[in-house]
Amino acid sequence: MLARSGDAAEEAVAEVRDLRVEIDGRAIVDGVNLRALPGKVTALVGASGSGKTTTGLALLGEYPPGAHVTGDVRLAADGLVGYIPQHPAAVLNPARRISALLTDIARARVRHLPLGQRRAAAREHVLSALAEAQLPDAEALLRRYPHQLSGGQQQRVVLAQALLLGARVIVADEPTTGQDALTKSRIVDQFAAVAAHDIAVVLLSHDLDVVRALADDVIVMRAGRVVESGPAQRVWLAPQHEWTRELLSERPEFAEPESTTGTGRPARPVLRIRDLTARHSDGAQGTTTVVRAAGLDLHPGECLAVVGRSGSGKTTLARCLAGLHRDQDGEVLFDGTPLPRSLRDRDRAQLAAVQYVFQDARAAFDEHRPVVHQVARTAIRLRGTDSDTAGREALATLTSLGLPEELVHRRPGQLSGGELQRAALARALLARPRVLICDEITSGLDTITRRGILDTLTALVRDRDDLSLVLITHDLETAALAHRIAVLDAGELVEQGSVRQILTEPSHPFTVSLIRTTARLATGTGT
């Protein structure tokens, strides 16, 4: 149930008391308590599927379909709640420009003004919110549609919407998903500034660096229950529960991969990019170039990480390779043969050879069909496999990637983010690709699940000499498992080289700043 109370003695702007959420008789949240105080950041942390998002959404009165709910959710009389979802594309209308999405909210804030002043005042509010959300080049951005933005830019547009709403409570569900260290640092500063205006922030996050830098109080969840809670410093320095200690100890530490130089690697790359330039259309205003004259080689058995801040062109570059972005010049060669720019123009062999795993695995699945059937369909369509054989291959691949058999027959909505990401990887692998492009596939996952996915990718490259991997990532720790790193900044490939060279002897100022900021966040020495 949802209750409203103006009881100032409690001080909390929002409060959850003994919340229990059941689906089909199984508790997904059980006995959770939370107090959101003005000017404070309360962080919920835990593994994928621990109940963080269900608890956060309870503050909005939102629950999974068919849920049975007991306990209380209480909001102050003026306790308007703003929500920033993990996957912002799901809440941004794809048919409307960013300007329309933000202006609709801003107009509601200026209704008290004389009619002649409202338009200018609404625009001022929009531009201010974009600046606070760290979205540069506002004029160009306002002309775009949501699909023309990177995942990080979409996330910050939703943040701007929450700021425009004037919420007293902001529930931020993985707000740093897909963000580079520089942007994370700014988001930490942003939410600290939000809290300084007596707004309560409820942060749902797997990113322990961000939680460490931002949270006043921490609630640690596992399997729907709170296993530990208290002041952030106490939880970090003296965790009392075994699960908390395990969560804090799972920070990935990757050894540098063995060099592939001199291992008999074929002279001809499996994938070659030459002078690739990609653009986004801004409608009547023209186009914006998002990737400029990029050149890269990918060899058989090699892992290449492409890093850069949100909006740098990483995803657009990946979509060009996969045939998902047509407005491009230059060449993408597969085994020396030009690949058609559009997916529709590629033959079945080319479609199978280059596979793409999306950042938002949930959006890539049909919510109405069992996961195993959707995975099997890849083998049927791209390899001509009969349905029985494809079903057996799908089941074997899913279970080999760590998904129990009882889960693979469920629909996507019944799986956690980490489980769905493994399913998406299995679907791509059933095509038996030569090139696998992974776009920020660990960005929304907790440290334990993330480590499992990365271990799986490492093993795939190690065990299959004919498989090459392109990792699109904002995270230098993830990039460190690659053989080589390419760095994008503002659409330009500013440097590339071995992992050791890029991480220990960077030559470009942007790479230097990215490495330094990552180190500061990791050590908690400031932003």
Image (spheres, helix red, strand yellow):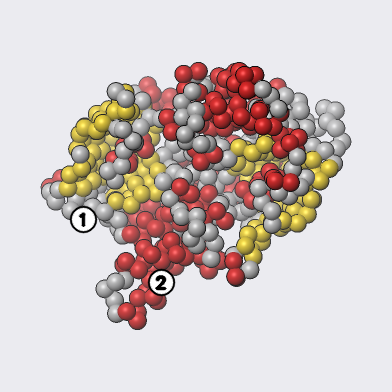
Tell me what residue is drawn at x 26 percent, y 31 percent. 68
Labelled disc at residue 457: none
Task: Check disc 1 and give the amino acid type.
Answer: Asp
Q: Answer above or below: position of 293 versus 36.
A: below
In the displayed structure, does residue 277 sit left or right of residue 250?
Answer: right
Horizontal and vertical percent position of residue 22: 29, 28
Q: Bin the neighbour count of mark 2 within 10 Å (Cα to Cα): few under 14, some 14-19, many 20 and up.
A: some
Q: Specify whether residue 375 is in view.
A: yes
User: SS class of the residue under badge 1?
Assistant: loop
Image coords of residue 140 (percent x, y): 56, 66
Residue 250 relative to residue 473: left or right: left
Horizontal and vertical percent position of residue 207: 45, 39
Of residues 176 and 368, the one nearer the viewer is 368
- The residue at 28%/34% (across/down) is 230
Image: 96 above or below 383 = below
Dot 2 falls on a residue whose secondary structure is: helix
Rounded to the nearest angstrom, the CA distance separating label 1 from label 2 is: 24 Å
Question: Dot 1, how many residues are within 10 Å of its Cα: few (below 14), some (14-19), or many (20+)?
Answer: few
Q: Earlier in the sequence, mark 1 or mark 2?
A: 1
Q: Which residue is mark 2?
A: 124
Which residue is label 1 attached to? Answer: 78
Q: Amino acid at mark 2?
A: Glu
The quarter holding residue 69 reads top left
